[in-house]
Image: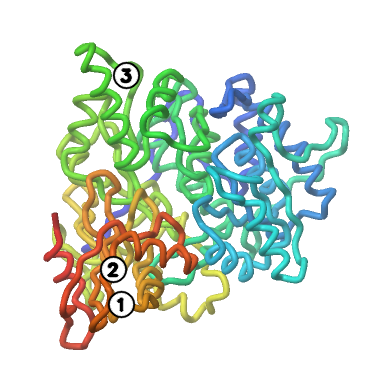
């Protein structure tokens, strides 16, 4: 059909040694398979000096599963966790997967408003978090949420730093001799194993529902695109609570790719820590890649021949279209194949992925080709297929498609699909002659900053309560460092006192807005431009304030 691109599963006989692209229905089957294939290879390490081989990882997840089962956790139990990127996160994820619990990962930067909303909707029974992280008291946040619900829910604190000092994991663990519960069966019809939080295009966070299989199968895009093996090391400094965290965990289990888990990212020190560890892959968005480039440039001030990442094979980029020139800069300054980009969303992770054999032009301008078994359709506003090379809305169909939204009736969700079951992404793009996808814009009113989604209406609603603001429109503007920055365009009330960016930030924080959603730029206007229908013409504002 015109406007549709489909990729079949690559020839499994041509896969790299140790890589099996068949994806079972449960994550636990992947754990068992990897432990059998490479039991003594260190699969995970973290920035606290700890590591786990594939066999040790399986054993740790089993012992944690026994301990959690003793607390009544099993199929149907909703467990919300807000944890840094450490060994505890991956062990907990697979322990809960073995038990068939419903996991609700929450990124660490979300606060009372978002965490309270999503856990209330999900009906969370167990809250897992750290006592504190980067100066914020996460334990107090979760305790307050439980108290607000009349004490409904159990709090499990995971002090990863204290445990690391003692050379152990900060998770409940049963003795090795205690009997294991049988692995949970795959999710049945209507069952959910993952609830991912996304602000998406609305102010109220949504819960995106997935099964083990719909998350894990997305990893095939990475495995076929970058061809990782047990000889590769990929440091992860982004929150594992992103759906990309579970996808990369699945990629590790599929291929044997080793992961270095870092609980925070510092632009000065982290790039060198990754280099010392022997990173062969780097990622995962423009701000990270720019930090690696800056570290390499700093080293060459004293030594023009310095090579920071001598083993680098490629870098990853996702979360937002990459800035022009980033691929060339990475290939030239850091080495390897340059930047392998991907495109997807919480509802449909890793829909596309670039490949090692793509041309430099394709790597520069596109986000790769459809992942295995993913179909892409490009349609006009009226839903008719666009001819090849013509911009339209991108629609997706494939095995990593989500199964619904938390609390949203099936009838409403059905409106997000066309008659053939393709998901309307709201993203605009063009598919090239070889199937490469170039993202050209978004129909969704969302700003992507540091690979995090910021819903413009949420920011607008809070800023509009400032006594000096008559009207406000929030837009995303291109930013070389973060991908996009949040810009507030404000019309002040008559006779209002002057307002600064710092004033707006303080007001938004007091209103409960997460710090990463704060405006970084403010512009003042006498009149906000509007469409014939009376809506603010944000396209005109974006053009006016483009750098």
- Closer to the camera in the image, 207 or 373: 207
Instruction: Evaluate whether residue 203 shows in this view.
Output: yes
Please state which of the two labelled residues, at mark 1 or mark 3, is closer to the viewer: 1
The quadrant the N terminus occupies is: bottom left
User: How many residues crowd around disc 2 within 10 Å: few (fewer than 14), some, or many (20 or more)?
Assistant: some
Q: Give yes or no for contact between labels 2 and 1 (Cβ–Cβ under 8 Å).
A: yes
- Closer to the camera in the image, 215 or 459: 459
Residue at x-position 58% and y-position 20%: 41
N-term mark: 1 or 3: 3
User: How many residues crowd around disc 3 within 10 Å: few (fewer than 14), some, or many (20 or more)?
Assistant: many
Residue at x-position 43% and y-position 56%: 515
Choose top left, top right, bottom left or bottom right for residue 224: top left
Residue 77's x, y, as percent? 73, 59
Choose top left, top right, bottom left or bottom right for residue 386: bottom left
Which labelled disc corresponds to residue 308?
Answer: 3
Q: Secondary structure at mark 2?
A: loop
Q: Give yes or no for contact between labels 1 and 3 (Cβ–Cβ under 8 Å).
A: no
Instruction: Evaluate whether residue 442 shows in this view.
Output: no
| Residue at numbered disc 1 | 469
Please state which of the two labelled residues, at mark 2 or mark 1, is closer to the viewer: 2
| Residue at numbered disc 2 | 499
Q: Is residue 42 left or right of residue 244?
A: right
Residue 430's x, y, as percent? 19, 57
The residues bearing labels 3 and 2 have C-alpha atoms spaced at a distance of 45 Å
Residue at x-position 61% and y-position 25%: 50
Residue 121's x, y, as percent? 61, 71
The residues bearing labels 1 and 3 have C-alpha atoms spaced at a distance of 49 Å
Taking 115 as reference, is 408 above or below it? below
N-term mark: 3 or 2: 3
């Amino acid at each position: 059909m015109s406007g549709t691109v489909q990729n079949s599963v690559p020839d499994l006989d041509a896969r790299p040694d140790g890589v099996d692209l068949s994806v079972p229905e449960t994550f636990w089957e992947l754990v068992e398979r990897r432990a059998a294939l490479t039991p003594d290879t260190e699969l995970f390490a973290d920035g606290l000096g700890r590591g786990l081989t594939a066999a040790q990882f399986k054993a740790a997840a089993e012992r944690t599963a026994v301990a959690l089962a003793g607390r009544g956790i099993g199929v149907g139990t909703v467990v919300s966790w807000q944890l840094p990127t450490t060994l505890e996160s991956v062990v907990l994820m697979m322990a809960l997967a073995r038990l068939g619990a419903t996991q609700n990962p929450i990124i660490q930067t979300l606060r009372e408003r978002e965490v309270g909303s999503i856990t209330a909707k999900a009906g969370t029974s167990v809250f897992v978090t750290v006592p504190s992280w980067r100066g914020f008291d996460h334990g107090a946040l979760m305790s307050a949420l439980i108290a607000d619900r009349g004490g409904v829910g159990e709090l499990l604190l995971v002090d990863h730093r204290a445990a690391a000092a003692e050379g152990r994991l900060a998770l409940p663990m049963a003795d090795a001799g205690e009997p294991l519960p049988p692995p949970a069966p795959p999710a049945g019809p209507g069952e959910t194993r993952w609830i991912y939080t996304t602000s998406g295009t609305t102010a109220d966070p949504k819960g995106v529902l997935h099964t083990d299989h719909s998350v894990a199968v997305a990893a095939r895009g990475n495995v076929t695109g970058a061809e990782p093996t047990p000889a590769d090391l990929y440091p992860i400094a982004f929150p594992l609570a992103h759906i990309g965290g579970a996808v990369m965990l699945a990629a590790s289990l599929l291929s044997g790719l080793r992961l270095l888990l870092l609980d925070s990212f510092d632009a000065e020190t982290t790039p060198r820590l990754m280099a010392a560890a022997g990173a062969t892959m780097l990622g995962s968005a423009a701000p990270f890649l720019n930090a690696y480039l800056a570290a390499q440039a700093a080293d060459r001030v004293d030594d023009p021949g310095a090579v920071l990442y001598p083993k680098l094979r490629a870098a990853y980029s996702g979360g937002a279209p990459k800035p022009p020139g980033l691929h060339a800069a990475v290939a030239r300054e850091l080495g390897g194949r340059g930047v392998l980009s991907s495109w997807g969303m919480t509802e449909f992770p890793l829909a596309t992925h670039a490949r090692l054999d793509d041309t430099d032009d394709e790597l520069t301008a596109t986000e790769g080709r459809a992942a295995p078994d993913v179909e892409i359709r490009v349609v006009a506003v009226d839903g008719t297929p666009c001819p090849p090379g013509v911009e339209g809305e991108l629609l997706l169909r494939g095995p990593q498609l989500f199964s619904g939204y938390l609390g949203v009736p099936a009838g409403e969700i059905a409106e997000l699909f066309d008659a053939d079951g393709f998901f309307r992404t709201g993203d605009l793009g063009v598919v090239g002659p070889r199937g490469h996808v170039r993202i050209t814009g978004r129909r969704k009113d969302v700003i992507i900053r540091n690979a995090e989604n910021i819903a413009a209406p949420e920011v607008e609603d809070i800023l509009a309560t400032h006594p000096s603001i008559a009207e406000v429109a929030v837009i995303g503007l291109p930013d070389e460092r973060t991908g996009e920055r949040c810009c507030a365009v404000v019309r002040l009330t008559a006779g209002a006192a002057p307002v600064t960016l710092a004033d707006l930030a303080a007001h938004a924080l007091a209103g409960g807005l997460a710090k990463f959603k704060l405006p970084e730029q403010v512009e003042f206007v006498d009149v906000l431009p509007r469409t014939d229908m009376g809506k603010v013409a944000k396209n005109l504002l974006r053009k006016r304030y483009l750098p």
